[in-house]
Image (tube, rainbow, N blue to C red):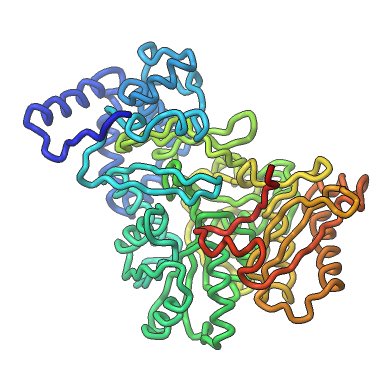
Amino acid sequence: MTEIADQSRPTGIRVVARHAGAWLIGLGRGAWLFPLDVIFKTVGLRYGWLTQLFRRTPPRLLAGLGQLRAERASWRAAKRVPAYRDFLEQAAVDPDDLFPFGILGRLPETDKRNYIDRYGLMERCVGGGVPYPGTTIDESSGSTGTPYNWIRGRREREVAHRNISFFARYAFGEGPLVTLNAFSMGAWAAGMNMSLGMTRHGIVKSIGPDIDKLLSTLTYLGPSYRFLISGYPPFLKHLLDEGARRGFPWDRYEVHGLVGGEGMTEELRDVLLERFRSVYSGYGATDIEIGMAAESPVSVALRRLARRRPDVREALFGDDPRLPMVFQYNPLIHFLEVNELGEIICTVSRLDLLSPRIRYNVHDEGGLLGFATARERLAAFGFDIERLGERDETAGPRGPLPWSRPIPLPFLWVNGRRDATISVMGANIYPEDIETVVYRDPTLVPRLHSFLLSTVDDERGVPRPMVALELADLAGVDDRWRATMADQLRDGLTGLNIDYRSSIAEFPDAMQPIVATYGLGEGPFAADAKRIKQRRIIRPTS
């Protein structure tokens, strides 16, 4: 294993060599990008400069420059990252026979299995080592079964923090803001980085997912402040439920929500908007970096319109009946592609990453949509993307969504992780399908804490979908209640999921869901108390 290079006290020779090496690499075939790098870094220091860059630069030019930067980053990784050099050689790609630009088509995809699991942490870094000062290690949540460690340097974290601050300014306005950070604290990327990013935008209290402390802090500070509460989507729902049980006066407070770490349906957003003034989600992966993309007023409005209008949804996102999450992203920082399987591939085009991410696949299914293309397709239905958020079609329970002039950045839409499904009789059933159905039921929402999706064999040995519900209140829950809920899930899935709709016509008994109910922390939900994120799928054990 390559050892950490102790560069905490570099000699004068090492400093000169390091800068000379960087200069020689830049002097090659990509030296002309250097002035643009200086411009982008300078513009990126100020929110107003950056938004004007996005508004005034033609989208095709932004996309082209983003690709050139991604290709340069890929070429640099091939030259200077030991693990990536070996990875390319094993894939029959000569790292010394690559031109700095036009190379992405020759490079294989990377992911946890074929790259991260095969090489050590330091081997995946530029030069095979890192400086000690300013370097941190994040740990992923282990939602795939195994927690992973990811190393980051000072400069890349500073860019991420600035992006978080800029996003908050755009989505929540420029007024004074008190952020109560309820993401899990510790080695995980979201918690600490969210706190550091939001300190650029206002007061921050890092609490973690502690409902008692959140409610006591809100009570102590009082309703004269404007609050932003950040956390995982289900946790914000639990916070509202517990506040309601304690009689917390939500109506006196102006509270906004910023969620991440997992997907969120519009049905859950509807529930949150009963108390929150606005709720936006960020998209990222600890594998790559947090803040790869974010919901914006226009992306949320687009999604809510697509929920009401299946014809609009198909025109924007294809014939998949699922309603994807919709984000906007900066093509100068993240170069995104879609492979033949419909999975999002990301290359981080900045050169400040200690461990470069080149054509990295987290196996999220989705697609890309240019802002101009979205404008044209919406216009065919009589909608103006510039004013979309003011239309009734996108209004939530509290009225029209907060609106600001849209920034014409490209859209990323995400259906979710490819393997986050169960399959019954050839039909793939997604946790998002279940979440959509259960949050439509106003009698279930106040008592629902969580759910799990799995397959079980019934008494005849027939595989069937099972939905386990974790309920805060089991009053009146009996076999009849569970049977009614099973019928409700069946009808909801029939309307949402084309696979399910086809299979239930052929196998009505096998596709009838089984509903199991548990109290808080009971049965399969007991393990969630020690988890950062709630599970949504139970895999059969072999």
Q: Residue at x 11, y 38 (%)?
A: 9
Q: Residue at x 50, y 23 (%)?
A: 108
Q: Is residue 482 left or right of residue 526?
A: right
Viewer-closest of 202 and 417: 417
449 in relation to 135, above or below: below
Q: Position of residue 2 (x, y in %)?
A: 30, 29
Q: Residue furthest front?
A: 542
Quarter of the figure with the C terminus: top right
Q: Is residue 391 visible?
A: no
2 in relation to 385, above or below: above
Q: Position of residue 211 (x, y in %)?
A: 48, 75
Q: Is residue 509 left or right of residue 468?
A: right
Q: Position of residue 278 (x, y in %)?
A: 52, 68
Q: Residue at x 80, y 45 (%)?
A: 424
Viewer-closest of 340 and 326: 340
Q: Position of residue 475 (x, y in %)?
A: 74, 81
Quarter of the figure with the N terminus: top left
Examine the image and state in which quarter residue 342 appears: top right
Q: Is residue 93 left or right of residue 16?
A: right
Q: Is residue 383 visible?
A: yes
Q: Is residue 393 left or right of residue 327?
A: right
Examine the image and state in which quarter residue 193 appears: bottom left
20 in relation to 333, above or below: above
Q: Residue at x 34, y 42 (%)?
A: 151
Viewer-closest of 95 and 478: 478
Please give the count of numbered marks on the rendered protein.
0
